[in-house]
Image (tube, rainbow, N blue to C red):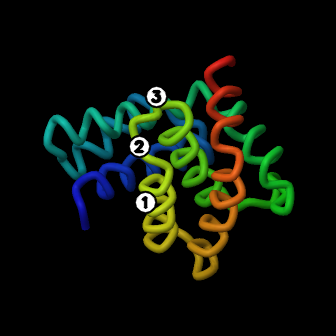
């Protein structure tokens, strides 16, 4: 597994735990890094994702629900929801990850952590969002 994919997986684990049981994000991330140490640059990447997504969580959820209405947001599995948040944050809020890379990485996370149908689902939702990439970027940056 590629190093940045591994870091995304760790960020996903942290975001999932925070989402499901409302644990402290800093403590959760530190615990994950103690269990599975990463080089400094990858640990920083995990931190950027976690603390980039968390403050925008409600806004990301709103955008996913608005631009992918075929998938009712309240019915999306928690792991898939967090994979989508990471991908949208990466391509639209952070802007450091090209759209296609964000989608591919999200599908890889879905294969590793989601159900059998998760990769197809994540790809479909992000495909719908990709069509509105410019709008999503603008809305996130105006928030």
- Residue 33 image-quadrant placement: top left
Task: Report the Cα–Cα distance between label 3 and label 2.
Answer: 16 Å
* Label 3 vs label 2, nearer the camera: 2
**Residue, x 83% and y 44% (percent of image)?**
66
Q: Where residue 111 sits in the image (x, y, percent)?
A: 48, 74
Q: Secondary structure at mark 1?
A: helix
* Label 3 vs label 1, nearer the camera: 1
Decide: is 49 above or below 110: above
Q: Where residue 104 sits in the image (x, y, percent)?
A: 45, 63
In the picture of the structure, the residue carrying the numbered disc 1 is 105
**Residue, x 25% and y 67% (percent of image)?**
1
Q: Where residue 67 sits in the image (x, y, percent)?
A: 79, 48
Q: Mark 3 or mark 2: name the one nearer the start of the chain.
A: 3
**Residue, x 52% and y 45% (percent of image)?**
86
In the picture of the structure, the residue carrying the numbered disc 3 is 51
Q: Mark 2 or mark 1: name the one nearer the start of the chain.
A: 2
- Quadrant in which the C terminus is drawn: top right
Task: Work out whether residue 20 or residue 57 is closer to the camera in this orientation and state it.
Answer: 57
In the picture of the structure, the residue carrying the numbered disc 2 is 97
Q: Mark 3 or mark 1: name the one nearer the start of the chain.
A: 3
- Residue 112 image-quadrant placement: bottom left
**Residue, x 58% and y 82% (percent of image)?**
116
Q: Where residue 27 sits in the image (x, y, percent)?
A: 38, 32
């Amino acid at each position: 597994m590629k190093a940045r994919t591994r870091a995304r997986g760790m960020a996903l684990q942290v975001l999932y735990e925070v989402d499901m049981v409302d644990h402290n994000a800093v403590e959760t991330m530190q615990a994950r890094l103690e269990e599975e140490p990463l080089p400094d640059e990858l640990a920083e990447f995990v931190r950027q994702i976690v603390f980039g997504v968390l403050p925008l969580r409600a806004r990301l959820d709103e955008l996913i629900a608005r631009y992918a209405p075929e998938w009712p947001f309240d019915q999306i599995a928690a792991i898939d929801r967090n994979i989508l948040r990471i991908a949208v944050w990466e391509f639209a809020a952070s802007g450091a990850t090209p759209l296609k890379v964000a989608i591919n990485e999200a599908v890889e996370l879905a294969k590793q952590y989601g159900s059998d149908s998760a990769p197809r689902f994540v790809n479909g939702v992000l495909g719908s969002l990709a069509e509105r990439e410019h709008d999503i970027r603008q809305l996130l940056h105006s928030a």
